[in-house]
Image (spheres, rainbow, N blue to C red):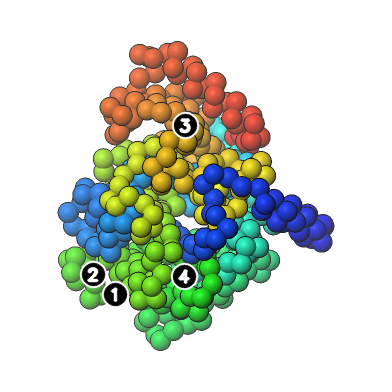
Amino acid sequence: MKNLKIAIKIFVLFIIIASFNTTDKTILKKEEKKPNIVFIVVDDLGYSDVGYMNYKEEIQTPNIDKLVTNGMVFTDAYAAAPVCSPTRASIMTGKSPAALKLTCHIPGMGMEKYLKKLNKGKKLKEGYFIDHLPQKEVTIAEVLKTQGYSTGYIGKWHLGGDGSMYTNDGIVNPDYLPNKYGFDTNVGGNAYGQPASYFSPYKNGTLKDGPVGEYLTDRLGDEAIYFIEKNKNQPFFLNFATYTVHTPLAAPVETMNKYDGNKYFAMIEKLDQNVGKIMQKLKALDLLENTIIIFYSDNGGLWGNLPLKGKKGTLNEGGIRVPMVVNWKGKIKLGSSCNTPVTSVDLYPTLLQLAGISTKNYTELEGQSLLPLLYGESTFTKRSLYWHFPHHRKEGLSMGAAIRNGKWKYIYQFETQKEFLYNLEEDISEQHNLVSKFPQRTKELSKELKQWQHNVKAEMPAINN
């Protein structure tokens, strides 16, 4: 069976390579140099937990804010799920979590124990989901490698099997590590959803321990710089996936003292410092004009997402709308902003076209390339965005599905069978449920959402016996 999967993946890659002569309007010209790609994905960073959003005076992120100077802020950027593993899988594959059957975070406590805990006392039991990224999928890293890219994964992976908390090193299955999905380098990526420790020794089988007390975010930043230096003479794809700002909250004492002991704010400062280190290295190597930097979060924050309602794990905006900046010196309008709704499944086709690869032969991709938006063109097709999250959470609007179409957002909650309709242009905080005021709009969005669920063969919750 394993050999069959490998054979299928090789065949798919052959088809991809054969398609390179097909051109799209927005892909590279033959004489142009392939751009480097630095994709920074932060864990659990909230919509308003960056300085440039101007919602929390205590948060200072000068280096992240500088990304806006030569870049574009996406005010309506979304994660494909309100928790981490599904969003990360969607980035790697360009497919929705529902289509991948990976709609929930992969439980460190183990699948059986997790489901028993979450389903207890509930009317519905959680929808089926798998515990790793399917090996048959062709990841964006695998495709970029065929185009001469050096590929590096540094940080949190969380797509490598359940039960990581019972391991001594975070490795549940070595066949599920990033190096098996197209990455030449893997530093720190395994089955962990959160670090065993933010300070060395790390108890991480893909990350050598540093000096006792070394801080994880600093170490991963140093590893990112080393990767860039090592691959400066060829195109590279760096996926820098910080474990921060996921719990357990921890930061160096000297940084916490700046914020009266607030660990979360201190973790954000350390994140910002290491984003700055990466940018400084790119500048020192004269790579900024040929490097696109994407800054993103895998789901909503845990500690308040003003002005949004809800938090991580919910289908309200606070659980799925995330900060996103795309920076590319000389290519993107300075300090620009885009309010077109986009999501993590759009990143795969975007990176394809950046590398000069046509998206026309990728029939299973569910997103769209963002290059028209980045270049200020009018060719980006408006469409609906969808979420399917058949999973329980202790609080907030979960165990449901949602759709956004233009200004309208509709949510259906499976457990209670309640419907919610919001006009996000007038009510970004989702305070006014308009179901009774706009019954026809509610019906139309409900029908479209159900049709999408049918199309992707979404796993549904069942009666809990």
Check if mark 3's residue and mark 4's residue have beta carbons within 8 Å.
no
Residue that badge 4 annotates: 196
Residue 425, picture quadrant: top left
Q: Give whichever of discs 1 and 3 has the lower sequence position.
A: 1
Q: CA distance from mark 3 to mark 4?
A: 42 Å
Q: Nearer the viewer, mark 3 or mark 4?
A: 3
Q: CA distance from mark 2 to mark 1?
A: 6 Å
| 435 lies left or right of 48 | right
Estimate the x, y position of residue 33 in percent, counting from the top left.
51, 63
**SS under mark 3:** loop
Q: Nearer the viewer, mark 1 or mark 4?
A: 1
Estimate the x, y position of residue 260 in percent, counting from the top left.
17, 66
The image's mark for residue 382 is 3
The kind of residue tagged 1 is Pro
Residue at the limit of the structure toward the bottom, as seen here:
211
**SS under mark 4:** loop
Residue that badge 1 annotates: 252
Q: Give whichever of discs 3 and 2 has the lower sequence position.
A: 2
Q: Give whichever of discs 2 and 4 has the lower sequence position.
A: 4
Check if mark 2's residue and mark 1's residue have beta carbons within 8 Å.
yes
- Residue nearer the viewer, 119 or 216: 216
Q: CA distance from mark 1 to mark 4?
A: 16 Å
Q: Nearer the viewer, mark 2 or mark 4?
A: 2
The kind of residue tagged 2 is Met
Q: Which of the image's four quarters has the C terminus?
A: top right
The kind of residue tagged 3 is Lys
Check if mark 2's residue and mark 4's residue have beta carbons within 8 Å.
no
The image's mark for residue 256 is 2
Q: Give whichever of discs 1 and 4 has the lower sequence position.
A: 4
The image's mark for residue 193 is none
